[in-house]
Image: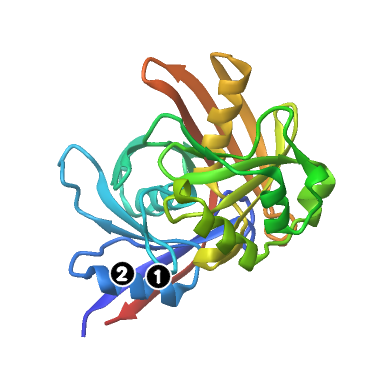
Amino acid sequence: MAEYSFETVDVFTHQRFGGNPLAVFPDSEGLSDREMQQLAAEMNLSETTFVLPPADASNTARVRIFNRNHEMPFAGHPMVGTAFVLARRRSEPGESLRFEVPAGLVTVRLSRTTDGAVQGAIIEAPQPLTLGVQIGAEQVAESVGVAASELIVSNHVPTLASVGNTYVIAEVTEGGLHQASPNLAAFRRILDATPGLDGRFSLYLYNRRGRAISARMFAPVVGTWEDPATGSAATPLAALLLSLSGGVRDEFTIHQGVQMGRPSLLEAAAWQTLEGIRASVGGTCVPVLRGEAAL
């Protein structure tokens, strides 16, 4: 019987049992695709990561990310949490890491306390901003049980956006953000009626006051009724807002998970490059559990 060690960490928080929990298997050689998916389902977290040797020896690791149902091309809090776990396991982790994921290469910069201990990371999303299909405000409102008047469309309509993982991003009033509750049947109707979603409908709602943002993310079709911290949605949001402003660079502080009792703090940034708008997100982590899985 083979045994595989794992650690769990709470990501995008300074306190245990806040932020977004993540399970990390730091040495996953020997695990099959099926076993990784089964372990992720058993963990029952929004994501679980499996660390493997990199295809390119100049990179730190190849990281596979699974939610309860399938593998993901990129996700934010798994990158931050995996970097935190690996850096704490290494005697000399350096200041940067590079992870190979299906969506591309993720560059990671570690963050440290004043005494030099690793406390978190800032990760750069693997792709520049791309925009896709637009969803009607009425449909989005129905999917979260609020009046269509709670959607703010003066800046942009609800839009599919990605920097490595796709989200429908919609601006809402403060009241609409608080009232939102996902309607699984409505999510499925929208997904079935919208080929441009490519079989994935995760909804990121936000309310903005300057550079301060409050957000919530719902993906009930894949079993995540609500996510307490979503780095791979914060990054396309930052990039989208920069594209609307026409600026060169901008930074945002994002609060998420408040309604779930798992308050999270994400620091997102976006900047113009020759290849398009790139984005990053960062935060701190707290270790929680260690254990072994026997297969």
**Residue at horizontal 57 percent and vertical 31 percent from the top:** 238
44 on left or right of 181: left
What's the amino acid at mark 1?
Answer: Ala
- The quadrant of the image that shows the C terminus is bottom left
What secondary structure is marked by label 2? helix
- The quadrant of the image that shows the N terminus is bottom left
Mark 2: few, some, or many residues within 10 Å (few <14, many ≥20)? many
What's the amino acid at mark 2?
Answer: Met
- Where is residue 156 shown, x and y percent of the image? 66, 30
| Residue closer to the observer: 288 or 152 | 152
**To which quarter of the image does residue 211 belong?**
top right
Say which mark, if any, is on residue 40.
1
**Residue at horizontal 84 percent and vertical 48 percent from the top:** 175
- Where is residue 5 shown, x and y percent of the image? 33, 71
What secondary structure is marked by label 1? helix
2 and 1 marks in contact (CB < 8 Å): yes
- Where is residue 200 shown, x and y percent of the image? 47, 55
10 on left or right of 101: right
**To which quarter of the image does residue 144 belong?**
bottom right
Q: Is residue 114 visible?
A: no
Vertical order, 122 against 230 (above or below): above
Q: Is residue 55 visible?
A: yes
- Where is residue 236 shown, x and y percent of the image? 52, 36
User: What colour scheme does the image use?
Assistant: rainbow
**Residue at horizontal 75 percent and vertical 58 percent from the top:** 259
Residue hosting label 2: 36
| Total marks in image | 2
1 on left or right of 167: left
Vertical order, 58 against 18 (above or below): above
| Residue closer to the observer: 181 or 281 | 181
**Residue at horizontal 69 percent and vertical 53 percent from the top:** 263
